[in-house]
Image: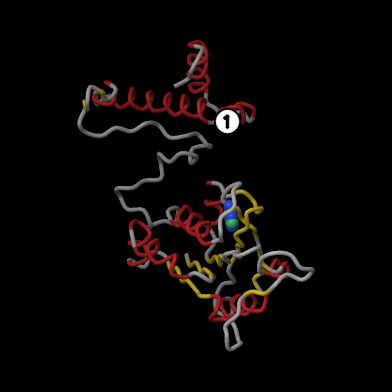
């Protein structure tokens, strides 16, 4: 997979692209990420990327010309990229969207900035994406969030030590189960006995129950949706019944 990023703050991406799982995937050539400075696509002496809004009002608006020029240059060779624009009012980013995007051969992420982007840029945009209902100073952190969630789903990016299978949201939206590591007792807090038992069937059942408990407590609407859609197994419905019988707090 290849991702191009268009930004006025390319330095913000340095650490993200160098460190950790993503840094390793890039240096091993599993994914190709290229960050472009929007100013490199201007044609004037002062490399101006923004201007005052027509009609007046506060703030500056990103000009269309450098963005179109970048889009045309970057998509002139090979596969056309799927174009994302980060905006606080965009479609809410989710694990499902991350999975969908991870299957595209090429993405171009345009980082919104200042008070906005000239509306005509939407002509080349496939999806406007928000990472949540809050306003950041620009689209760079959203671009990093989107890339991190998308790239870890690309085959070969996660090593053997990391795995997708126990991810929250990856199994029908259910949240993950609690994890423990050594020591088996820490400051009087013990690891649940079942995890030390070596009994794989019991461990599997405990994890399923914990995942359901956590989802019921933190995101009850996910359980409701799965029930409505008939996506819970007999065993899971039985576990839920038992939890409900206990009454009170599901966790
Ligand atoms: N730009 C500013 N805030 C944002 C948000 N929450 N999501 C995406 N882009 C943004």
List x then y, in percent, for residue 45.
58, 89
Q: State the residue in front, 24 or 50.
A: 50
Q: How many marks?
A: 1
> In the displayed image of the protein, which residue is found farthest to the right?
55
Residue at image point 61% right, 65% down:
114
Q: In the figure, is residue 56 to the left or right of 88?
A: right
Task: Give the secondary structure at mark 1.
Answer: loop
Seen in the picture, residue 89 relative to 181 is either above or below; the reply is below
Seen in the picture, residue 149 relative to 246 is either above or below; the reply is below
Quadrant of the rendered image containing residue 203? top left
Q: State the residue in front, 13 or 219.
A: 13
Ligand 1 within 8 angstroms of badge 1 C-beta: no
Q: In the figure, is residue 240 to the left or right of 133?
A: left
Residue at image point 63% right, 30% down:
229
List x then y, in percent, for residue 214.
46, 28
Q: Quadrant of the C terminus?
A: top left
Q: In the figure, is residue 78 to the left or right of 178?
A: right
List x then y, in percent, for residue 167.
43, 41
**Where's ligand 1: which quadrant?**
bottom right
Seen in the picture, residue 193 relative to 101 is either above or below; the reply is above
Q: In the figure, is residue 217 to the left or right of 178?
A: right
Q: How is the image coloured?
A: secondary structure
Question: Which residue is under mark 1?
Answer: 231
Q: Residues within 10 Å of mark 1 (few under 14, many from 20)?
A: few
């Amino acid at each position: 997979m290849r991702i191009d990023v268009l930004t006025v703050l390319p330095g913000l991406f340095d650490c993200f692209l160098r460190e950790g799982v993503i840094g390793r995937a890039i240096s091993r050539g599993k994914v190709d990420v290229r960050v472009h400075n929007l100013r490199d696509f201007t044609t004037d002496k002062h490399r101006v990327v923004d201007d005052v809004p027509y009609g007046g009002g506060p703030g500056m608006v990103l000009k269309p010309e450098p963005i179109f020029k970048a889009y045309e240059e970057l998509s002139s060779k090979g596969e056309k990229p799927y174009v994302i624009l980060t905006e606080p009012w965009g479609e809410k980013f989710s694990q499902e969207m991350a999975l969908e995007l991870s299957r595209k051969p090429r993405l171009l992420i345009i980082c919104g900035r200042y008070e906005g982007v000239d509306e005509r840029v939407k002509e080349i945009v496939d999806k406007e994406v928000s990472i949540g209902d809050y306003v950041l100073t620009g689209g760079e952190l959203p671009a990093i969030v989107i890339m991190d969630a998308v790239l870890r789903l690309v085959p070969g990016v996660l090593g053997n030590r990391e795995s997708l299978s126990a991810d929250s949201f990856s199994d029908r939206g259910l949240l993950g189960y609690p994890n423990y590591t050594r020591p088996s007792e820490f400051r009087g807090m013990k690891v649940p006995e079942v995890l030390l038992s070596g009994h794989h069937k019991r461990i599997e059942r405990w994890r399923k129950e914990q995942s359901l408990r956590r989802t019921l407590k933190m995101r009850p609407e996910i359980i409701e949706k799965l029930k409505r859609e008939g996506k819970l197994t007999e065993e899971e419905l039985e576990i839920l019944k038992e939890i409900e019988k206990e009454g009170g707090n599901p966790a």
